[in-house]
Image (cartoon, helix red, strand yellow):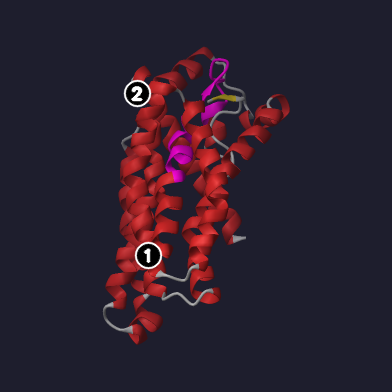
Amino acid sequence: MCRIIQGLAIGGEWGGALLLAYEYAPPKKRGLFGSVPQMGITIGMLLASAAFAAMAAFGTEFLTTWGWRIPFIASIVLVAVGLWIRGGLGETPHFKAAKESGSIPKLPLAETLKYHWRAVLVAVGVKVVETAPFYIFATFVVSYATGTLNYNQSSALNAVSLGAALSTLLIPVMGAFSDRVGRFKVYFAGAVAIAIFAFPFFMLLDLQENWALFAAVVIGLGVVWPPVTGTLGTCAPRSSRPASATPVSRSATRSVPPWPVVPRL
């Protein structure tokens, strides 16, 4: 139940952040602006890694008893900062115009599912292409490398941190690049690269060498994944953005991008 609630919350946060970034962005820089919220994923990973590394410095016993609780308690500060930022944000001009025209439906989510259900399914599929590889490159690899292949845990975590750092740098680069060549080309190139790298990823891990572990994770998380995630939230709709998009984005699950129409990548 907690995971379901978390998923709904992340869906609202993610969709709302993308809409704000996209709609406030200059027309020729929407790819760059829309990629910035995507950086929050890898930046969060880096902050979490740094926090637990600091706790681990006091010893394993401290970490397993009380140390692991400290970062969670400290995250209350981030929640407070987030609420403060939200309090100063207004609606975008697009939403204000739709509201003034009276074109916002009473139940935007119901309207979306009724009239745009095909696009919602497409959006879910587009999101899966981004999410599934991420959990393989960033989460599954740690348990697989340490539990099945007997890598050192610190090596696995350091590899993920390095991959996340590189990804943080490349996500806005991919977003800006999509402004030049188009969303579809960048997204499709990333999806193809992920598919091609699937087998080499595990082949490198099976070498059971630290350099191979770092190469697999850094290439997977830091090179082939950013083109997909960097353009995912900047898919422009084929038709004009419907008035229901903003409310829906705040109530959608994490698997549904903020536009309830088929994206033109």
What amino acid type should be assigned to the residue bearing mark 2? Lys
User: Which mark identifies residue 62?
Assistant: none
- Element under disc 2: helix
Magenta stretch? Answer: 224-246
Task: Give the residue number, with chain letter if any, for mark 1.
Answer: 211
Tell me, yes or no, if residue 254 can be seen here.
Answer: no
Judge left or right: residue 232 versus residue 119. left
Q: Residue at x 65, y 33 (%)?
A: 122
Furthest toward the top, the residue is 101
Q: Residue at x 31, y 42 (%)?
A: 85
> Sequence order check: which comes first, mark 1 or mark 2?
2
User: Does the stretch in magenta take in 238?
Assistant: yes
Q: CA distance from mark 1 to mark 2?
A: 37 Å
Q: Residue at x 57, y 41 (%)?
A: 127
Which one is in front, 54 or 190? 190
- x and y, in percent, of residue 35 in the image: 39, 35
For the N terminus, the quadrant is bottom right
Task: Give the residue number, with chain letter if any, for mark 2.
Answer: 29
Tell me, yes or no, if residue 133 can be seen here.
Answer: yes
Q: Could you say which quadrant of the image residue 263 lies in?
A: top right
Q: Could you say which quadrant of the image residue 214 lies in?
A: bottom left
Q: Could you say which quadrant of the image residue 3 lies in?
A: bottom right
Q: Neighbour class for label 1 at 10 Å: few (<14), some, many (≥20)?
A: few
Which one is in front, 29 or 144? 144
Q: Neighbour class for label 2 at 10 Å: few (<14), some, many (≥20)?
A: some
Furthest toward the bottom, the residue is 61
- x and y, in percent, of residue 222 in the image: 39, 49
